[in-house]
C-alpha cells in the first residue's frame, strides 16, 4: 500500500493537469473574489428588492434568502467561506480526479499494478487517497487566491468566532473528501476520462438545478435538497451556525461510505485490460 501510494503521489506531483488546475484555481479565486465584492455592494444596497423579485418568480422566501446568503460580507473570513462553498472549485477537482483515474484505464497502468500482485483494495484506496489530497490541494489554492484578494480589500477580520470557524472548516474537509470519493467512484464506473468528466460536471449541476426549481413548487423539497452534497456544500456555514450542524457531517459520511463501497465493489469485479 505504501509503495503504491508513494508511486501515485509521485505521478500526480508531475501531472500537467494538476499543475494547470492549480494555476487556474488561484486565478479564478482572485476573479471570483472581485466579482463577489461587486455583487456584495449591489446586494447590500438592494437586498429586500432582490429577495422579493425571487419570491415573485416562484421561489420560497427561505430559498431566496439562502441564495443571497452566499454573497459575502465585508471581511476576510466571509470570502474564505464563499470560496470553500463555491462549486467552481469542485469542477476543477472533478477534472483532476477524472484524468487521474481515467488515464490509468486508458494507459493500462492499472493492469500493471494488479498483475504485480497488489490487492485491488490497496490499488483502489491508493487512488482514493491521492484523489482526496489532490482535491484538498486545489481547494487550498482556490481559497488562497480569494483570501489574498479579500485581505487586500478588507484586511483581516471575521464575524464568526474561532471555534465556529474550526467546526465549519472540519465540515468542509469531510465534504470535500466525500466529493473526491464520489468523483473517484464515477471514474471507476465509467473507466474513461471523457465519460467520467462529462458525468461529473453535468449530472451534479443538473440535479442541483432540478432540486432548486422543484423547491419553487414545493417548500418541503428544499429540506431534502440540502442532502444533495453539492447543495450541502453551499449551505455549510449556515447549518454549522444553527441546530442543523449535524447535516453536513452526516451527509459527508454517508456519501463517503457509499461512494467508497460502490467504487470498490465495481473495481473488484472489473476486467482490467
Image: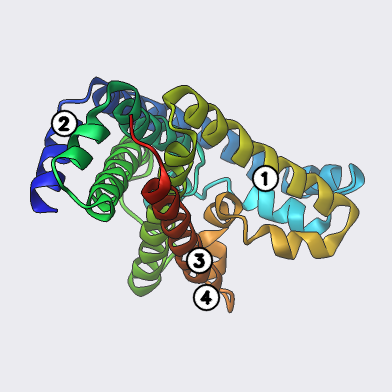
Q: Mark 4 points at which residue?
A: 246
Which one is nearer the viewer's eye here, 215 or 52?
215
Q: Residue 11 carries which label?
A: 2
Q: What residue do we see at 40% from left, 71% from top?
A: 164
Query: Is residue 241 in sight in this rendering?
Result: yes
Q: Can you identify the residue that label 3 sits on?
A: 254
| Mark before the other along the chain sequence, 2 or 3 | 2
Say which element carries label 4. Answer: helix
Of 249 and 141, nearer the camera is 249
- Which color scheme does this rendered protein use? rainbow
Which of the 4 quarters of the picture holds residue 38?
Answer: top right
User: What element does badge 3 sit on?
Assistant: helix
Marks 1 and 2 close (CB-CB < 8 Å): no
Q: Do the residues labelled 3 and 1 touch (CB within 8 Å)?
A: no
Q: On screen, 126 above or below 221?
A: above
Marks 1 and 4 sit apart, C-alpha to C-alpha, by: 21 Å
The CA distance from mark 3 to mark 4 is 12 Å
Which badge, 3 or 4, comes first in the chain's sequence? 4
Label 3 crowd (10 A; few <14 / some 14-19 / many >=20): some
Foreground: disc 1 or disc 2: 2
Q: Which of the marked residues, 1 or 2, is nearer the chain's N terminus?
A: 2
Tag 2–tag 4 contact (CB < 8 Å): no
Amino acid at each position: 500500500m505504501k509503495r503504491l501510494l508513494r508511486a501515485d503521489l509521485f505521478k500526480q506531483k508531475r501531472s500537467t493537469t494538476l499543475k494547470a488546475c492549480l494555476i487556474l484555481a488561484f486565478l479564478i479565486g482572485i476573479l471570483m473574489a472581485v466579482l463577489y465584492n461587486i455583487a456584495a455592494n449591489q446586494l447590500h444596497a438592494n437586498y429586500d428588492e432582490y429577495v422579493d423579485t425571487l419570491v415573485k418568480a416562484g421561489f420560497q422566501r427561505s430559498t431566496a434568502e439562502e441564495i443571497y446568503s452566499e454573497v459575502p460580507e465585508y471581511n476576510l473570513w466571509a470570502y474564505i467561506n464563499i470560496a470553500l462553498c463555491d462549486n467552481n472549485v469542485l469542477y476543477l477537482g472533478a477534472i483532476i480526479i477524472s484524468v487521474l483515474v481515467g488515464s490509468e484505464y486508458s494507459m493500462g497502468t492499472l493492469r500493471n499494478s494488479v498483475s504485480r500482485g497488489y490487492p485491488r483494495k490497496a490499488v483502489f484506496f491508493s487512488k482514493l487517497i491521492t484523489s482526496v489530497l489532490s482535491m484538498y490541494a486545489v481547494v487550498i489554492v482556490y481559497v488562497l487566491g480569494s483570501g489574498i484578494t479579500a485581505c487586500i480589500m478588507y484586511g483581516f477580520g471575521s464575524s464568526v468566532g474561532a471555534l465556529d470557524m474550526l467546526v465549519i472548516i472540519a465540515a468542509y474537509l469531510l465534504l470535500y473528501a466525500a466529493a473526491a470519493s464520489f468523483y473517484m467512484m464515477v471514474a471507476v464506473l465509467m473507466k474513461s476520462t471523457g465519460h467520467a468528466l462529462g458525468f461529473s460536471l453535468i449530472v451534479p449541476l443538473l440535479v442541483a438545478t432540478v432540486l432548486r426549481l422543484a423547491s419553487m413548487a414545493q417548500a418541503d423539497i428544499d429540506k431534502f435538497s440540502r442532502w444533495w452534497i453539492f447543495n450541502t456544500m453551499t449551505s455549510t456555514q449556515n447549518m454549522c451556525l444553527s441546530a442543523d450542524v449535524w447535516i453536513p457531517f452526516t451527509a459527508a459520511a454517508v456519501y463517503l461510505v457509499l461512494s467508497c463501497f460502490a467504487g470498490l465493489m465495481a473495481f473488484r469485479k472489473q476486467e482490467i485490460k
